[in-house]
Image: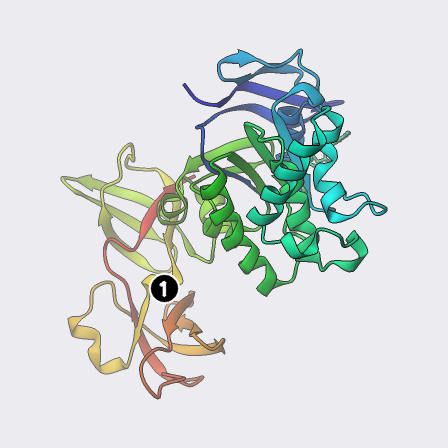
Amino acid sequence: MALLELRNVTRRFGDFTAVDCVNLSIEAGELFTLLGPSGCGKTTLLRMIAGFDVPDSGQILLDGQDIANIPPEKRPIHTVFQSYALFPHMTVADNVAFPLKMSGKAPDEIKKRVEQALAEVQLSRFAHRFPHELSGGQKQRVAFARGLINRPRLLLMDEPLGALDAKLREDMQRELINLQKEVGITFVFVTHSQDEALALSQRIAVMNQGRVEQIGEPSVIYGQPANRFIADFIGKINLMEAQVTQVSGQDMTLEADKLGTTTLPLKQGVNVGDKGVIAIRPEQISVHAPDKQAELPHAHSGKVLDFLYVGDVTTYIVELDCGIHMEALLANSAPGRARFFEVGDPVIVSWTREAAQFLPN
Ligand code: ATP
């Protein structure tokens, strides 16, 4: 049985539907992420799981039991917010001890468990400091320790790394993954950052306009996006409008705007006449000098319009002869090579049959 199950959960504010018939199951021990653009309903959903808000319809089950009538403080669930919500007048140790004191635990036990919790988040040395004497990352770790001290069944986190700079965020993402493994508690993480969701999660639910559009492992969400919205929202991708003109055996033939006729592996459920987009990730596109055309699959000639060198990779914008602009990502790992092409260079771009996907409208 799933630890947490949402069944047809809906929340309306006036005539606006913020969460629209959401169904999902989260297993015990998962690091699960709700990902979506600002305003898609992530926080509203999290607040209903925590008990701070109530669904208009649908059910939230924990261990198979409907928790509608259990107030937030009685649920075995803790929420960590981006703002840390630490008590400024209390030391780190007192902040972490607070939930135990509230539940009337004995001083000896509190001391032992606070020491253990601070060790888990590598803050033992900071027990006697006050929040204003800590960095952002350290404050967030105190919030995690406080969230974990009562060993909740579920730890909910709403953009907990949102206030940290990029480098620290990455460190904290690794720490969170390790912490989750160590304590074995189910984490539900909310973010609008696709990079963060891909890096952190065992599974992701992608939300858009109150609905869950796809649930899956990061590699599936990235590699086999269910639709155009997800393809576009997660990472960079080239999208070309196209229509299916023929389906035969293992193949489907598409007529793409400007690009012309192209053949891709048949996708289940696709019929002649379906419209949608051909989607290709930039790292799936290769760029070659123009003498190579004969040997390459799905090859199109063009010229380099622009490029962006960012150290490990260079992104090239290539204008194909048909007028389409395509983005290709080349790793700069070849020794001594920082740039392969200059602006204006004639090039051939190509991709394999498997690299391109058709996403119906
Ligand atoms: P963000 O990433 O910006 O925090 P989110 O995905 O968490 O966004 P929510 O905070 O869940 O989005 O809000 C979803 C929608 O519901 C938004 O359009 C928001 O304006 C609306 N909303 C949320 N709470 C209320 C409320 N109490 N009254 C009216 N509208 C609300």
- Judging depth in this view, the residue of 332 and 15 nearest the camera is 332
Per the image, the residue denoted by label 1 is 283
- Do we see residue 54 in this rendering? no
> Residue 88, percent across and down?
83, 47
- Answer with the quarter of the image where residue 93 lies: top right
Residue drawn at 67 percent across, 55 percent down:
138
Residue drawn at 36 percent across, 73 percent down:
331
Give the residue furthest to the bottom.
336
> Residue 161, percent across and down?
63, 51
- Do we see residue 194 in this rendering? yes
Where's ligand 1: which quadrant? top right
- Judging depth in this view, the residue of 97 and 298 nearest the camera is 97
- Answer with the quarter of the image where residue 336 lies: bottom left
Of the residues shown, which amino acid type is indicated by label 1? Glu
> Residue 168, percent across and down?
60, 61
Left or right of 170, for residue 315: left
| Mark 1 residue crowding within 10 angstroms, few (<14) / some (14–19) / many (20+) | some
State the quadrant of the C terminus.
top left
Left or right of 335, for residue 84: right
State the quadrant of the N terminus.
top left
Position above or below: 98 against 262:
above
Give the residue furthest to the front.
108
Residue drawn at 24 percent across, 60 percent down:
352
